Image (cartoon, coloured by chain):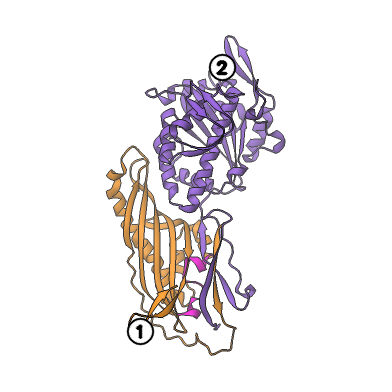
Chain colours: A orange, B purple
């Protein structure tokens, strides 16, 4: 039962100027298009994996679509993270995995209190590797998506955070949809600290 | 609305006390956190392992067919029941000496390894079920070539050799201690009985050591990279015959990722060498019935019923 915790400094409750006060974020959903870096067919028969690549590639596209939807719903859609309303996310997990994921909202999504902390999430980028396990008939049986995702979250106080999620998601086709039945996901957010650029103008880097 | 002054992630603190994909710890409730920092869960996962209280038993059979011979038409050099307790995430391995003299359904008394010759894996399963009263869910059959290829495809195995093994028949040539072996060497390790103090009893235990070594390595790889499960499953499916459907193989593999190898019991049914007619046989000990009955209950064997290790017995 591995776990990683991250600590976020925060001021005392109540007084102190209300840095996070006011809303003001817009409700545009940033577009995410995970870049497929690799597709691998894993053969369980004597058929060479190379010959199974075409079948794996078509599955990789479907799995990538599913992952784009997952990350959009979990991290990018303000309609979800503002209200801690991630039903679109849970719907992508099968029954066993769903119950676990709902207990791990802070790792699987932008978080239950993201609406209190952030004003905006933008600039999503990411890449995906898809490995497809073929069955005894050389047909796709299940797939694992290995995802690296980042986005920039702007806090209500104007500070920026690089939201980083890396994960492996095992999926299988259920009634025409690709559902997650197992996963391992890690959140490692970093503050983006403004630093002077070469010309003296400020730029930002993540620490 | 709760207001916070929040700024910076201070540090990442990792602790690893189990499977990467294991159920994650419950996040600290916000109310319990010190006022100046918040602890959030940043790592989570789920493994679709077997659950429930009923044990699952799988019969692993190693054919002694040489390359080119039909795997199912020969005898078996290796017969093991693996019991899995889904609730405890523990397992046991029970090996049978190949010369065990038992009732082969439809064929009278004979050595247990002839069941494969008479009726393939199905008759071997029937024989073991009849002997032990344990209901076998699946069988897995491998061969010399199969085990060699499988081990090579997963990149070799680290085996803890219990004592010096030098045997020209099996080509075992090992000093004691941990060593990484390729498929050919693992095969030799599992075949050698001539240089073992307890002969075939010790060999059966060594075969169990290979199971545990594979489990240890699989868990290590799975923790680092869960997608490795596909490579292991594929290597298995390419090189063994089995009655286990792919989805169940995956479930068993995910379950294996949660079993601590240190808790796996590796046992061999005790017995003594004897003869029946002109055959050299093994007469299984009367203690065997207690082991079977114990294992049948929950897939595990109570300490009081665990037989002594044959490899720990004094030579001679």
Is residue A106 one of those drawn in magenta? yes
- Taking the spot 59% from the left edge, 55% from the top edge, the residue there is B17
Query: Circle 2 — which element?
Result: strand
Distance CA(mark 1)–CA(mark 2): 93 Å
- The chain identifier of the residue carrying mark 1 reads A
Identify the secondary structure beneath mark 1: loop
Compared to residue B14, the image places residue A52 above or below, namely above
| Magenta span | A103-118
Q: Quarter holding the N terminus of chain B?
A: bottom right
Toward which corner of the image does residue A37 lie, by quadrant?
Answer: bottom left
Q: Nearer the viewer, mark 1 or mark 2?
A: 1
Camera-side residue: B191 or A23? B191
Residue A66: image tag: none
Chain of the residue displaying label 2:
B
Identify which residue, B183 or B62, lies in the foreground: B183
Q: Give neighbour class at mark 1: few <14, some 14-19, many 20+ (Cα, 10 Å).
A: few
Q: Is residue A77 visible?
A: no
Q: Which residue is labeled 1 in the image?
A: A200
Point out residue B72 in the picture as x, y percentages from the top left corner. 43, 25
A96 or A192: which is nearer to us?
A192
Q: Nearer the viewer, residue B51 or B64?
A: B64
In x, y percent, where is residue B155? 43, 41
Residue A111 location, x and y as percent?
49, 72
Residue lying at 45% horizontally and 60% vertically, measured from the top left: A93
The circle on residue B108 is 2
| Relative vertical location of residue B52 with respect to residue A161 in this rendering, above or below | above
**Image: B53 above or below B60:** below
| Residue B184 in which image quadrant | top left
Q: Is residue A127 left or right of residue B162?
A: left
């Amino acid at each position: 039962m591995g776990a990683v915790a991250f600590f976020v400094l925060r001021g005392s409750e109540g007084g102190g100027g209300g840095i996070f006060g006011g809303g003001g974020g817009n409700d545009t959903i940033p577009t995410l298009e995970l870049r497929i870096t690799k597709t691998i067919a894993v053969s369980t028969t004597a058929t060479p994996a190379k010959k199974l690549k075409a079948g794996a590639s078509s599955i990789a596209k479907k799995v990538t679509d599913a992952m784009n939807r997952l990350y959009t719903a979990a991290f990018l859609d303000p309609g979800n993270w503002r209200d801690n309303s991630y039903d679109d996310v849970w719907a992508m997990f099968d029954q066993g995995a769903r119950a676990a994921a709902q207990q791990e909202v802070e790792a699987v999504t932008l978080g239950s209190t993201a609406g209190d902390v952030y004003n905006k999430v933008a600039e999503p980028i990411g890449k995906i590797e898809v490995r497809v396990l073929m069955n005894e008939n050389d047909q796709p049986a299940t797939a694992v998506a290995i995802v690296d995702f980042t986005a920039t979250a702007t806090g209500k106080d104007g500070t920026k955070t690089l939201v980083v999620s890396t994960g492996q998601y095992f999926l299988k086709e259920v009634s025409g949809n690709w559902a997650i039945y197992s996963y391992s996901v890690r959140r490692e957010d970093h503050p983006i600290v403004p630093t002077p650029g070469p010309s003296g103008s400020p730029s930002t880097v993540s620490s | 609305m709760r207001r916070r002054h929040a700024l910076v992630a201070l540090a990442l603190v990792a602790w690893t006390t189990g499977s990467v994909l294991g159920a994650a710890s419950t996040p600290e409730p916000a109310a319990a956190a010190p006022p100046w920092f918040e602890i959030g869960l940043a790592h989570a996962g789920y493994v679709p392992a077997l659950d429930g209280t009923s044990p699952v038993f799988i019969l692993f059979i190693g054919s002694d067919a040489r390359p080119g011979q039909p795997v199912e038409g020969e005898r078996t050099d290796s017969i093991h029941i693996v019991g899995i307790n889904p609730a405890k995430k523990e397992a046991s391995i029970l090996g049978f000496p190949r010369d065990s003299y038992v009732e082969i359904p439809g064929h009278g008394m004979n050595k247990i390894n002839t069941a494969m010759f008479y009726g393939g894996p199905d008759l071997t399963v029937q024989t073991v079920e009849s002997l032990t009263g344990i209901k076998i869910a699946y069988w897995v059959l491998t061969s010399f070539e199969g085990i060699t290829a499988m081990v090579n495809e997963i990149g070799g195995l680290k085996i803890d050799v219990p004592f010096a093994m030098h045997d020209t028949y099996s080509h075992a040539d090992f000093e004691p201690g941990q060593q990484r072996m390729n498929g050919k060497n693992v095969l030799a390790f599992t075949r050698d009985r001539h240089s073992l103090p307890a002969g075939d009893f010790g060999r059966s235990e060594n075969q169990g050591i290979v199971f545990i070594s594979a489990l240890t390595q699989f868990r290590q790889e799975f923790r680092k990279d869960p997608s490795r499960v596909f490579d292991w499953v594929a290597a298995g499916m390419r090189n063994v015959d089995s009655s286990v459907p792919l989805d169940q193989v995956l479930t068993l593999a995910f379950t294996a990722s949660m079993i601590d190898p240190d808790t796996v019991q590796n046992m061999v049914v005790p017995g003594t060498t004897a003869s029946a007619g002109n055959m050299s046989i093994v007469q299984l000990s009367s203690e065997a019935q207690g082991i079977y009955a114990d294992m049948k209950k929950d897939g595990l064997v109570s300490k009081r019923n665990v037989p002594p290790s044959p490899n720990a017995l004094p030579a001679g």
